[in-house]
Image (cartoon, helix red, strand yellow):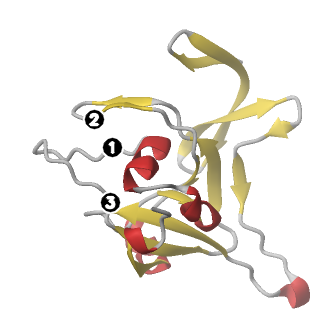
C-alpha cells in the first residue's frame, strides 16, 4: 500500500506493509532497499558479548522517555534553544509555562531493543511558534517506562555539554 506524508504542501510517497505482531498491527515503511527506519541494537560483538548502544535524552520534568538523540550530536547544538528548534521539542507544559530542558541523561539501550531512527520534522507547537526540526532522533519502540527506567542515568546540566 502507498502512503503520502508531508507538511507545508511538500509530500513524499512511501511504500508500506502491514505486519501483525503480538501487540496488533504495525505499519512498516519501506523504500527500494527495504525497511529503512526500524533497527535492532546488535546482539553480536567480539567473543559473543552483548553490545549496547548509548544515547542522550534532554529533559526538564520527564527523565524517562522514548525519544533520544545520539550522544555524538550533543556538541553540535549551539545552545538549548538551538536544541529545542532542531529537535522540534515541545516545551510548553499543560499549564502554559515554558519548561526548557535543563538536564541530560545517558541512556544505555541494551542489545535486542528495537529503535526507530528518523529526522525531526518541523512543528508548530502552541506557545512556541515554528520549530524547524532537522535533527536526527531515535525512538525506543515498545517503550515501557516501568521496565526501562534503569536505562537512564543522570549526566548533569545540559549547558555543560552543549556548545555555547
Residue that badge 1 annotates: 90
Gap between marks 3 and 1, in whole Å?
A: 10 Å
Q: Nearer the viewer, mark 1 or mark 2?
A: 2
Marks counted in the figure total 3
User: Is residue 23 shown above or below 161?
Assistant: above
From what the image shows, is residue 52 above or below residue 132?
Answer: below
**Picture layout, residue 131 above or below residue 156:** above
Q: Residues within 10 Å of mark 3 (few under 14, many from 20)?
A: many
Disc 2 on helix, strand or loop?
loop
The picture places residue 38, in percent across and down from the top left corner, at 69, 48
Q: Nearer the viewer, residue 149 or 71?
A: 71
* Disc assigned to residue 128: 2
Q: Earlier in the sequence, mark 3 or mark 1?
A: 1
Contact flag, marks 1 and 2 (Cβ < 8 Å)? yes
CA gap between label 1 and label 2 equals 8 Å
Residue 71 picture location, percent across and down: 59, 67
> How far across and how far down the image is residue 36, in percent?
76, 41
Q: Residue at x 43, y 56 (%)?
A: 79
In what element is the residue under mark 1?
Answer: loop
The residue under label 3 is: 101
Amino acid at each position: 500500500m502507498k502512503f503520502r506524508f508531508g507538511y507545508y504542501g511538500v509530500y513524499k510517497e512511501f511504500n508500506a506493509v502491514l505486519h501483525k505482531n503480538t501487540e496488533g498491527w504495525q505499519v512498516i515503511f519501506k523504500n527500494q532497499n527495504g525497511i529503512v527506519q526500524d533497527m535492532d541494537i546488535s546482539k553480536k560483538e567480539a567473543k559473543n558479548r552483548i553490545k549496547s548502544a548509548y544515547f542522550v535524552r534532554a529533559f526538564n520534568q520527564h527523565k524517562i522517555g522514548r525519544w533520544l538523540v545520539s550522544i555524538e550530536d550533543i556538541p553540535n547544538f549551539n545552545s538549548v534553544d538551538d536544541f529545542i528548534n532542531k529537535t522540534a521539542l515541545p516545551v510548553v507544559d499543560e499549564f502554559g509555562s515554558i519548561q526548557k530542558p535543563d538536564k541530560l541523561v545517558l541512556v544505555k539501550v541494551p542489545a535486542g531493543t528495537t529503535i526507530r531512527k528518523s529526522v525531526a520534522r518541523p512543528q508548530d507547537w502552541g506557545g512556541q511558534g515554528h520549530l524547524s526540526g532537522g535533527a536526527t532522533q531515535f525512538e525506543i519502540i515498545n517503550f515501557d517506562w516501568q521496565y526501562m527506567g534503569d536505562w537512564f542515568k543522570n549526566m548533569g546540566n545540559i549547558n555543560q555539554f552543549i556548545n555555547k
